[in-house]
């Protein structure tokens, strides 16, 4: 078995160099259609992107601009009403529904 790259997308990052926060991306079915999406920080950590992989294409389907730079892991609360919680470098806790 080997890994084979099927698509690339250079506008995101899963973690910051030197940070202990290694859970800065989550996968779920955010749009209710077939297949999962990935919620991942933009490369400057100032927004969260929902991206979907279609065949050989990667598409941004939503973007959440944060009120500061992402500084925590992403917490996905997947209960009756799913929500996403993150912290920013200016001390804010942000809830994205």
Image: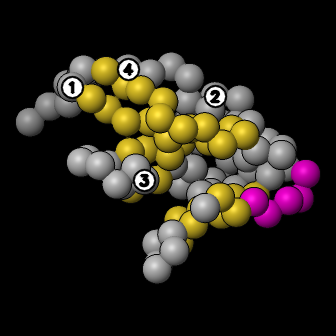
Calculate the distance from the C-alpha at mark 2 to the C-alpha at mark 3. Answer: 21 Å
**What residue is at 89 percent from the left and 59 percent from the top?**
91
Of circles 2 and 1, the one toward us is: 1
Looking at the rendering, which quadrant does residue 11 occupy? top right
Q: Which SS class for mark 2?
A: loop
Image position, residue 46 (x, y; %): 74, 36
Residue 55 got which mark? 1
Q: Is residue 73 visible?
A: yes
Quadrant of the drawing holding the C terminus: bottom right
For label 2, the crowd category at 10 Å Cα-Cα, with few meaning under 14, some 14 to 19 and many 20 or more, is: some
Q: Are marks 4 and 2 in contact (CB under 8 Å)?
A: no
User: Is tag 3's residue or tag 1's residue first in the polypeptide sequence?
Assistant: 3
User: Is tag 2's residue or tag 1's residue first in the polypeptide sequence?
Assistant: 2
Residue 43 got which mark? 2
User: Is tag 2's residue or tag 3's residue first in the polypeptide sequence?
Assistant: 3
Q: Which residue is mark 4?
A: 8
**What residue is at 54 percent from the left and 55 percent from the top?**
23
Looking at the rendering, which quadrant does residue 94 occupy? bottom right
Task: Specify the farthest residue to the bottom.
Answer: 80
96 horizontally vs 25: left or right = right
Q: Nearer the viewer, residue 32 or 11?
A: 32
Q: Are marks 2 and 3 in contact (CB under 8 Å)?
A: no
> What's the magenta region?
90-94
Residue 30 got which mark? 3
62 horizontally vs 4: left or right = right
Residue 92 got which mark? none
Q: Is residue 27 visible?
A: no
Of circles 3 and 4, the one toward us is: 3
């Amino acid at each position: 078995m080997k890994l084979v790259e099927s698509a690339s997308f250079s506008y995101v990052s899963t973690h910051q160099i030197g940070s202990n926060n290694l859970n800065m991306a989550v996968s779920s079915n955010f749009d209710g259609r077939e297949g999962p999406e990935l919620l991942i920080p933009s490369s400057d950590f100032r927004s969260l992107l929902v991206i979907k992989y279609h065949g050989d294409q990667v598409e941004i389907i939503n973007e959440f601009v944060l009120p500061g730079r992402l500084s925590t892991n992403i917490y996905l609360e997947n209960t009756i009403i799913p929500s996403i919680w993150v912290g920013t470098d200016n001390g804010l806790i942000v809830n994205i529904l």
